[in-house]
Image: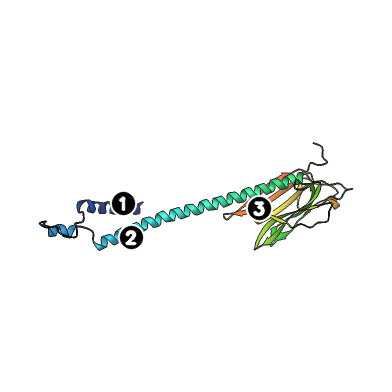
Amino acid sequence: MNSFTNITGISKYFMKRIISNPPLPPFKKEGQEVSSANHVNAGFTLIEILISIAILSTILAAVYGTFFLSHRAIEGLEESIVKMQEARKAIDILKCEIESVYYNENHDSLLRIEDRDFHGKPSTQLTFTAFSVLRPGLSKLFYYVEEKDGKLNLYKKIESLYREEKSEGVDIIEDLEAFTIEAQYDDKWIRTWDTEINKAIPGEIKINLTLKMKGRTVTLFDVAKPMLGRSI
């Protein structure tokens, strides 16, 4: 505040100089007397010009710095919002697919939750059969985490249950901190499940997705309830 007051005071000083002592023309007209005193006091000295340039540079640097910081803050906010929306959308899609999980002991179907980690970061591998909107009939879906360019990305892959085919996974979320799937068993959340052993699907499945945004760790989660084969 004091710096701004000083700059304002100096600016007023120079405005008074301009009004009280306007610069004289460089050449004397015929018959015109020019006072030596006025000639000495007219215009600005070199020091005053240098001070004016310094003040102007300071003001421009402050304005540019404020604009640059504001622009960076807006860009960071937009990036965080987009990343949050992508994570929320991925969780919603996975929740709908889990609620469509199909399992039958007498049919080629399964639900498998495998607890894994990458460099100490939890990364579940989820495999299950369900009815997907992306292809007709029963499909086999995979959700897994892989490292790419030093970052953990969440991949999704869908294969037909009736045809021999190999498809490549598509990355749906980049730069994860953690991806975990938990199944409810005896009022507890566990990170492993296999229908070949348990012979059933859990009543509730929790989806956890952890991201790092602007230096902060944020965890999004939702709970899916498999509906097929259950009474409503």
Which quarter of the rendered picture does the C terminus lie within?
A: top right
Q: Amino acid at mark 3?
A: Thr
| Circle 2 SS class | helix
| Circle 1 SS class | helix
Q: CA distance from mark 3 to mark 2?
A: 49 Å
Q: Extreme top residue here?
A: 232
Question: Hey, which quadrant is residue 212 in on the image?
Answer: bottom right
Q: Position of residue 27 (x, y in %)?
A: 17, 60
Please indicate, yes or no, whether residue 185 appears anywhere in the rendered image. no
The crowd level at tag 3 (other Cα within 10 Å; few <14, some 14-19, many 20+) is some
The crowd level at tag 1 (other Cα within 10 Å; few <14, some 14-19, many 20+) is few
Q: Position of residue 31 (x, y in %)?
A: 10, 56
On the image, numbered disc 3 is attached to which residue?
Answer: 210
Q: Amino acid at mark 2?
A: Ala
Q: Position of residue 75 (x, y in %)?
A: 53, 52
In primary-sequence order, the first of circles 3 and 1 is 1
Point 71% across, 46% down: residue: 93
- Observer-nearest of 32 and 122: 32
On the image, numbered disc 1 is attached to which residue?
Answer: 8
- Observer-nearest of 164 and 169: 164
In primary-sequence order, the first of circles 2 and 1 is 1
On the image, numbered disc 2 is attached to which residue?
Answer: 54
